[in-house]
Amino acid sequence: MLTAILTAVGLLAAMGLVFGFGLGYASKKFAVEADPRIDKIAAVLPGANCGACGFPGCASYSQAIVTGAAPIDKCPVGRAKAVPAIAHIMGVDCKDADVTADVAMVMCHGGKDQCGTHFDYSGVKSCWAANQVAGGHKNCGYGCLGQGSCVQVCPFGAMHLNDSTGLAEVDPALCHGCGKCAVACPRGLIAIVPADKTIHVRCMSHAKGPDIRKTCKVGCIGCGICVKNCPVDAIGMQDALAHIDPEKCTSCGVCIEKCPMKTITGR
């Protein structure tokens, strides 16, 4: 009996050694060499894994850069610092790469004092849920619902709800322009804008002027005064809503002074 047990143990040990050597040989023989640039690029990326680049995480984006499946400037979080470093690793020129820093901006500043509600919402703390209840509780059908869906998804803690206004706000010092908040907003109120552009039309309503005056004290009424007074023709009208072209805007502030509704603000 003891002999049979020892024989079985010996056979198992021998088989383990054979399979072990076999696996070791196979791992060497069929090993796929990883491009060392992948790890180097991953090291200079911010490691936020936010997905703003269009890939599941920084490691996937690093691999895509090395294989030529993605450009070197797709990471909005570490764009300014990471692009030159990635260009050096890849041995390419980055003079045409986009290194502009972006931030999120909530295009609504009609708070509690400027835009009221037509009923009290006490449901799930979600802008998507609130928007489904009779089209939202806010008098303006385009305004910020203030339930914090954008705050919940921000991976950098750059968004918060202002208790005084009931609106979502962005801290530009913490924001990296990843765009997750913009996706989370059911009303499309959050825009990703160049960080160095501080003047914005803080309204997304496409209602007519008289209707806007009834619902919000700071809504764009489509009067066109800003368009007429802009010294560099940076403002146009789109569907009765003023729109500032960041490429042309010099941040002179004339539009802020002239806007009768104070819809245009400077950050």
Image (cartoon, rainbow, N blue to C red):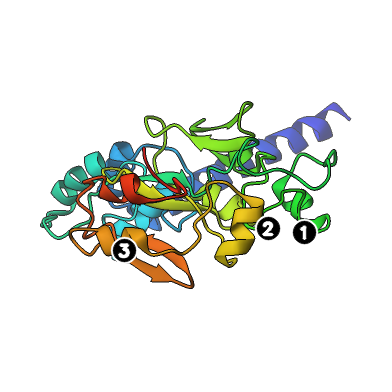
- Asked if residue 10 is positioned above or below residue 207 in the image, the reply reads above
- Asked if residue 239 is positioned above or below residue 118 in the image, the reply reads below
Q: Quadrant of the C terminus?
A: top left
Residue 198: x and y in percent read 31, 43
Going from N to C along the chain, the mark reached first, 3 or 1, is 1
The kind of residue on which mark 1 rests is Gly
The reply to whether dot 1 and dot 2 touch (C-beta < 8 Å) is: yes
Please report the residue visible at 18 percent of the width from the left and 53 percent of the height from the top: 90
**Residue 122 lies in quadrant:** top right
Tell me if mark 2 has few (under 14), some (14-19) or many (20+) residues whose alpha carbon lies within 10 angstroms of its own: some
The residue tagged with tag 2: helix, strand or loop?
loop
Please report the residue visible at 64 percent of the width from the left and 26 percent of the height from the top: 163
Q: Which residue is mark 2?
A: 141
- Asked if residue 41 is positioned above or below residue 6 in the image, the reply reads below
**Mark 3 vs mark 2, CA separation in Å:** 25 Å
Q: Which residue is mark 3?
A: 227
Tell me if mark 1 has few (under 14), some (14-19) or many (20+) residues whose alpha carbon lies within 10 angstroms of its own: few
Left or right of 210 on screen, residue 125: right
Going from N to C along the chain, the mark reached first, 1 or 2, is 1
Going from N to C along the chain, the mark reached first, 3 or 2, is 2
Q: Which residue is mark 1?
A: 135
Residue furthest to the right: 1
**Residue 97 lies in quadrant:** bottom left
Q: Is residue 28 visible?
A: no
Residue 39: x and y in percent read 32, 43
In this orientation, which residue lies closer to the viewer: 165 or 27? Answer: 165
In this orientation, which residue lies closer to the viewer: 39 or 250? Answer: 250
